[in-house]
Image (cartoon, grey):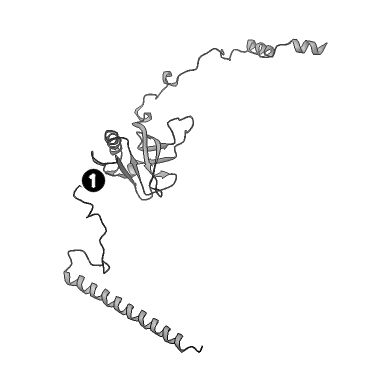
Amino acid sequence: MMGVQMKSVQPNTEWIAFAARSDHLLDPETPLRNPEHINYPGKDDPSVIAINTGMLDRKKRFTKSYSEGFYVLTAAGYLHEHTSSDVTKHPEPRLSIFLPNCTLGAPTGVHARSHKFSITLGKGKGISLGRSDGYTLRARSHDELMEWWNDCKQLSKVYRASSLDAPSLTRQSRRPRRWTVPDRCPPPSAPPATCRKRRSRTMRRARRSRRTRRRTSSRTRTARRSRPR
């Protein structure tokens, strides 16, 4: 008899009875609230509104390839990097740079193949995961690059306004110079005689080293020949 009565009870009977006695429950049909429509103190304060947000590519330190990230520039001077633009999935930034302690490199020119700029950290400055002395960030277009660079310039301690491009440097001039003698000369202001003396000393040391190696090798050959067979 008891089992028949329990089977006749609906699964939500207890919840309906509890909800009827409580005045602090919301109606299940109530729609979700949009945070943008909620008014609270400090909502429109400039210190909590991001100066710029968007996607940028950061150059990796070892592989030299670029990884995409969602960047947020705050009025407090921090440039945060998130894995994606979905804050619910990635609420914590994986990289944070405090721009007032950094040096902002000059942006590339309009006709450059890559639209990028660099950020150099000061000594003992910056907060990051995978600490590095500097970062290179790349944008999708030159207009987007200049928008990010101008915003970061307002918050950086030092910035360089000259372009990273150097049209006067040709491919031939960028090749490394080959020296037959180590370049240990003083600055150009020193007299040329000092350079000649230092180079001559280096040449003499190199000749003595070659003579020593020849004597050692000849002694070794003589010792091998004198061994009884």
Rendering coords of residue 170 (x, y %):
21, 51
Tell me if residue 86 comes above or below residue 62 in the rendering: above
Q: Residue furthest front?
A: 229
Q: Closest to the observer: 37 or 228?
A: 228
Disc 1: CA contacts within 10 A as few (<14), some (14-19) or many (>=20):
some
Q: Quadrant of residue 194?
A: bottom left
Rendering coords of residue 4 (x, y %):
79, 11
Residue drawn at the location 33% of the way across and 42% of the way down = 100
Rendering coords of residue 200 (x, y %):
23, 75
Tell me if residue 197 comes above or below residue 15 in the rendering: below
Residue drawn at the location 42% of the way across and 41% of the way down = 95
Give the residue type at disc 1: Asp
Q: Dot 1 corresponds to which residue?
A: 165
Task: Report whether 95 appears left or right of 26.
Answer: left
Task: Report whether 125 appears left or right of 10.
Answer: left
Q: Closest to the observer: 133 or 70?
A: 70
Residue 81 appears anywhere in the view: yes
Q: Quadrant of residue 53?
A: top left
Residue drawn at the location 17% of the way across and 72% of the way down = 193
Residue 73 appears anywhere in the view: no
Rendering coords of residue 19 (x, y %):
63, 12
Residue drawn at the location 67% of the way across and 11% of the way down = 17
